[in-house]
Image (spheres, rainbow, N blue to C red):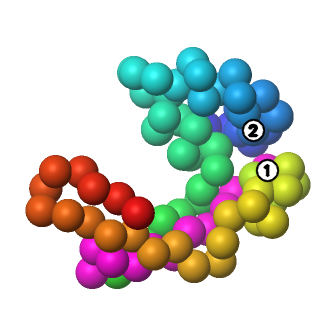
Amino acid sequence: MSATWRAVYLRELSTTWRKADGGPGRRMLTEALFSRIEVLGGREATIHLTDEAVAYGFAAAIPDRLDVTVGYGRGERS
């Protein structure tokens, strides 16, 4: 995904999220926000924001550390 499209998706986040329901939209939004996601043992994840996400202030809104709780295959998250 090009930097231009990442910027468009992030600049219009509410519209992007609404339109992202179904199809490849949520994957594309994730690619606009994160350059890399590292998962350790299913309980801890380290996220790396794209330059565009940082430029739009997402670094202030997303924590440095993200704890993930995974249930028994039923999709629970916290």
Q: Which residue is mark 1?
A: 52
User: Disc 1 vs disc 2: Cβ atoms closer than 8 Å?
Assistant: yes
Label 1: few (<14), some or many (≥20) within 10 Å? many
Q: Residue at x 48, y 65 (%)?
A: 37
Name the front one of labels 1 and 2: 2
Please identify the quarter of the rendering in which residue 16 is found. Answer: top right
Of the two numbered discs 1 and 2 on the same chain, state the one appearing first in sequence.
2
User: What kind of element bears circle 1?
Assistant: helix
Is residue 51 shown in magenta? yes
Residue 10 badge: 2
On the image, the x and y values in percent for residue 5 come to: 72, 31
Asked if residue 6 is positioned above or below residue 49 in the image, the reply reads above
Residue 13 badge: none
Mark 1 vs mark 2, CA separation in Å: 8 Å
On the image, the x and y values in percent for residue 63 come to: 66, 72
The type of residue carrying mark 2 is Leu
For the residue pair 27 and 65, the one nearer the viewer reads as 65
On the image, the x and y values in percent for residue 26 come to: 48, 34
| First to last magenta residue range | 41-52
